Amino acid sequence: MPRSPLDAVRDAPNACQALPHVVTAGQPTARQLADLKEAGDVLVLDIRDPMEPRSFDEPVEARTLGLDYINIPVSGGTLDDSTLDRILGVLRAAGERDVFFHCASANRVGGAIIPYLMIDQGMEEEDAVEQAMRIGLRSAEYMEWGLDYVRRHAS
């Protein structure tokens, strides 16, 4: 039995313990979802578009396992404040609950988590970007999406 959500998805692309209650990665397998369920009360936050190809029906599998599953699609057409507002809402509402936050490779996750790292966790920009890159961020476009949100919403 996996001891933690990170143990459950350790072999997923770019698996990372981003924060104490947030594990990030690329696309998990059906087995890794089952291991997440065994690891405890984990919320799955999937930011892949439902039309992206996968080897299994993740929403159905997650719900069959009894995992809470939320999909907030991130693609070129959804890089806006409302998408980040929804993602931040899920992360904030989770509180101390474990969240498994993923896309296909963790690139989009890296960009989307920047506002949470800076606004909610108090990280400086350089540290947040470094953490986002450790998570899997590779796209300047996703990085700028997250940073631009922070510039306009940080108090």
Image (tube, helix red, strand yellow):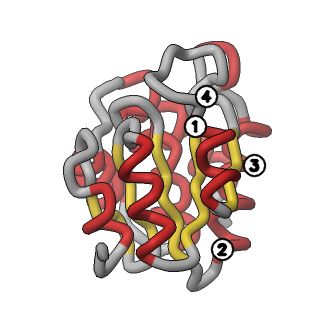
Marks 3 and 1 close (CB-CB < 8 Å): no
SS state under label 4 = loop
Residue at the extreme right: 82
Front in this rendered view, residue 145 or 56 = 56
SS state under label 2 = helix
What separation in Å lies between label 3 and label 1 (alpha carbons)? 20 Å
Which callout, 3 or 1, points to the residue nearer the camera? 1
Task: Tell me which numbered mark, 2 or 4, is placed earlier along the sequence.
Answer: 4
**Residue at left 34%, top 24%?**
139
Task: Tell me which numbered mark, 1 or 4, is placed earlier along the sequence.
Answer: 1
Q: Quarter of the image holding residue 141? A: top left
Q: Residue 94 carries which label?
A: 2
Label 3: how many residues lie within 10 Å, few (<14), some (14-19) or many (20+)?
few
Relative image position of residue 140 (x, y in whole percent):
36, 24
- Which three-letter amino acid code belongs to the residue tagged 4? Val
Q: Residue 58 carries which label?
A: 1
Task: Tell me which numbered mark, 3 or 1, is placed earlier along the sequence.
Answer: 1
> Quarter holding the C terminus?
bottom right
Q: Which mark is residue 86?
A: 3
Q: Which mark is residue 74?
A: 4
Residue at the extreme bottom: 96
Task: Tell me which numbered mark, 3 or 2, is placed earlier along the sequence.
Answer: 3
Label 4: how many residues lie within 10 Å, few (<14), some (14-19) or many (20+)?
many
| Vertical arrangement, residue 44 with respect to residue 17, above or below | above
What separation in Å lies between label 1 and label 2 (alpha carbons)? 21 Å
What separation in Å lies between label 3 and label 4 (alpha carbons)? 11 Å
